[in-house]
C-alpha cells in the first residue's frame, strides 16, 4: 500500500511541468502558454500522529493507543484549454494495528469547462456546509467513519456533475445551478473491532455490508443553486439544495442481540444555507465585523424493499451561527475568530433520533492565528448539549517547525468527551485523548 502511494508521488515528481500548488485545483497556476500543450500541478502531505486514550482504558480487545498515518497527494492535469483532470489518492492507517489500514481514491475526475457551463465525471467530493461543526445541508458524500466519528473524511461518490453559470444581476451575483447524478452506491467506511470508533459496543459484532441498497435504490440525484445576494442590509452567499437517494450517514441499529448493521434507507432532503455580513454603511462598524451563518434542512425517509428496520421519522434540522473576527489582539498581525452556534432538530422521536449526536447543542469556538512566519494557531472548541450534561471539549496548538523544515508542522491536540443521554457515542468506549502530530507538506 505505502509502496503504491510512493509510486504515485514519484510519477508526479518526474513530470516535466510538475511544481508545488498552494490553493484549489489548477487555481490559475497553469499559465496560458502551457494550457494548450498540457501541464501538471501537484501537492500533498504525510501526517504521523501518535494518540493516547485517557479514559475507559483496558477495555477487552479495544486499543488504548494509536499511531495514525495519513497521507494524500493531489495531482492536477491540464489536458487542453477547456479540459482538466484531478487525482487525489489517500492512505489512512493505524500502524500499531494490522487490522486498520486502507488506501483508496476519494477524488478522480475529468472536467470539461468551455464557458458558461461545465461537466465533471468520476469520483466526486464536495462540502456544501456553511456552519462550523455541523452541516445539515452537506448531503452529497458518504463518510469515512473510521477516521473520525465527529468530523469524518469524505468517501468519493461515482457520478456526474453538470453546472450552468448565469449572468450576474443587480442583486444576485454569479448564479450557478448544478445537477448531480450518482447511479452507484459508495459504502461508508467503519473502523475495525480493535478501534474505539468501531460501531458495535465491546462484545458486539458489526456487519458493514448490512442491507446495502442495490439496483435503482442506490441511485442518488441532487440539485444545488448558489449565488451571492447583495442588499442594502446584508452581503451574502446563499445556496438551495434538493436531493433524493440513499442516506449518506446511515444510523447503526441492533438487528438482534449483540449484532449491529448500518440501517440504510432512502432520504429526500431540501435545504437552505446562507453566510451573511451586515452592511457597514447602514448598520455600523460593529455589526459589519460579524458573520451570520444558517443552515436549515428537512429530511424525509423511505424504506428499501426487504429491510428489517422501521423507517426513521421525518424531521427538521437547523443550525444558526455567528462569527466575529477581532484583529490585532496581541500584535499588529494576529486575528482571533470567535464563533457561537446553536443546533436543534424537531419532529422525530424514534430510536434513530435518540442516537444522533447533534440535536440540541450549543457550540463555542475560539480560533487564534498569529499570522507569523511559523503560522502559529491555537483553537478551542466546545459542544454542550442543551438538554443534559453531555459535552465535548477540544483544544489544539499548531506551528511550523521552521528550524527543522518550512514544510514540517507540529500539532498538539486534546479531546475530552463527557457522555450524557444515550447516543451513538455513549455506546462506545470514551474517546477522550491526547495526541501529538507531525505533518510534512510537499
Image (cartoon, helix red, strand yellow):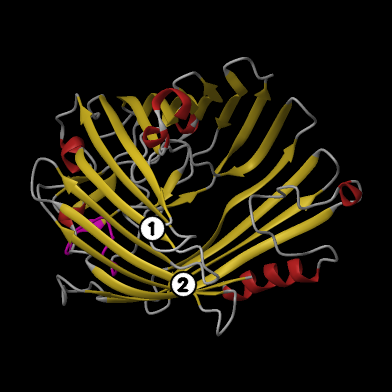
Residue 8 visible (yes or no):
yes
Residues packed near mark 1 inside 10 Å, few (<14), some (14 to 19) or many (20 plus): few
Mark 1 vs 2, N-terminal side: 1
Residue shown at the point (86%, 44%) measured from the top left: 80
Residue segment shown in magenta: 194-205
Magenta region includes residue 199: yes
Quarter holding the N terminus is bottom right
Depicted 168 relative to depicted 256: above or below: above
Q: Which mark is residue 329?
A: 1
Q: Which residue occupies 48% across, 37% down? A: 128
46 lies above or below 380 = below
Q: Quadrant of the C terminus?
A: bottom right
Q: Secondary structure at mark 1?
A: loop
Chief SS of the magenta region:
loop
Q: Secondary structure at mark 2?
A: strand
Question: Quadrant location of residue 16?
Answer: bottom right
Residue 276, given in percent of the width and then of the height, sits at 44, 30
Amino acid at each position: 500500500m505505502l509502496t503504491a502511494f510512493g509510486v504515485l508521488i514519484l510519477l508526479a515528481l518526474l513530470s516535466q511541468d510538475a511544481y508545488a500548488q498552494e490553493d484549489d485545483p489548477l487555481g490559475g497556476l497553469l499559465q496560458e502558454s502551457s494550457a494548450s500543450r498540457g501541464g501538471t500541478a501537484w501537492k500533498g502531505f504525510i501526517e504521523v500522529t501518535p494518540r493516547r486514550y485517557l479514559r475507559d482504558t483496558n477495555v477487552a480487545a479495544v486499543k488504548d493507543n494509536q499511531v495514525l498515518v495519513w497521507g494524500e497527494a493531489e495531482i492536477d492535469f491540464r489536458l487542453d484549454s477547456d479540459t482538466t483532470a484531478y487525482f487525489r489518492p489517500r492512505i489512512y492507517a493505524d500502524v500499531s494495528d494490522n487490522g486498520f489500514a486502507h488506501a483508496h481514491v476519494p477524488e478522480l475526475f475529468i472536467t470539461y469547462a468551455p464557458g458558461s457551463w461545465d461537466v465533471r465525471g468520476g469520483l466526486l467530493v464536495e462540502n456544501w456546509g456553511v456552519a462550523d461543526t455541523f452541516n445539515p445541508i452537506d448531503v452529497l458524500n458518504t463518510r469515512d467513519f473510521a477516521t473520525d466519528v465527529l468530523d469524518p473524511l469524505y468517501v468519493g461518490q461515482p457520478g456526474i456533475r453538470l453546472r450552468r453559470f448565469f449572468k450576474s444581476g443587480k442583486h444576485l451575483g454569479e448564479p450557478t445551478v448544478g445537477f448531480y447524478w450518482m447511479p452507484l452506491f459508495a459504502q461508508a467506511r467503519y473502523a475495525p473491532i480493535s478501534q474505539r470508533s468501531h460501531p458495535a459496543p465491546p462484545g458486539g459484532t458489526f456487519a458493514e455490508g448490512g442491507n446495502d441498497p442495490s439496483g435503482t435504490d442506490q441511485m442518488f440525484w441532487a440539485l444545488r443553486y448558489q449565488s451571492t445576494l447583495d442588499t442594502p442590509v446584508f452581503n451574502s452567499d446563499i445556496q438551495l439544495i434538493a436531493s433524493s437517494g440513499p442516506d449518506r450517514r446511515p444510523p447503526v441499529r441492533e438487528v438482534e442481540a449483540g449484532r449491529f448493521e448500518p440501517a440504510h434507507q432512502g432520504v429526500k432532503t431540501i435545504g437552505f444555507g446562507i453566510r451573511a455580513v451586515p452592511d457597514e454603511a447602514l448598520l455600523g462598524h460593529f455589526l459589519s465585523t460579524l458573520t451570520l451563518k444558517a443552515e436549515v434542512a428537512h429530511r424525509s425517509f423511505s424504506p428499501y424493499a426487504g429491510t428489517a428496520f422501521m423507517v426513521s421519522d421525518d424531521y427538521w434540522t437547523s443550525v444558526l451561527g455567528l462569527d466575529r473576527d477581532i484583529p490585532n489582539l496581541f500584535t499588529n498581525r494576529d486575528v482571533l475568530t470567535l464563533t457561537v452556534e446553536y443546533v436543534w432538530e424537531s419532529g422525530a422521536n424514534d430510536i434513530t433520533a435518540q442516537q444522533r449526536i447533534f440535536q440540541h447543542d450549543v457550540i463555542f469556538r475560539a480560533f487564534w492565528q498569529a499570522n507569523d512566519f511559523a503560522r502559529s494557531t491555537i483553537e478551542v472548541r466546545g459542544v454542550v448539549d442543551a438538554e443534559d450534561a453531555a459535552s465535548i471539549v477540544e483544544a489544539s496548538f499548531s506551528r511550523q517547525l521552521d528550524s527543522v523544515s518550512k514544510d514540517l508542522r507540529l500539532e498538539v491536540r486534546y479531546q475530552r468527551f463527557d457522555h450524557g443521554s444515550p447516543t451513538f457515542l455513549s455506546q462506545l468506549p470514551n474517546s477522550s485523548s491526547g495526541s501529538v502530530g507531525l505533518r510534512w507538506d510537499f
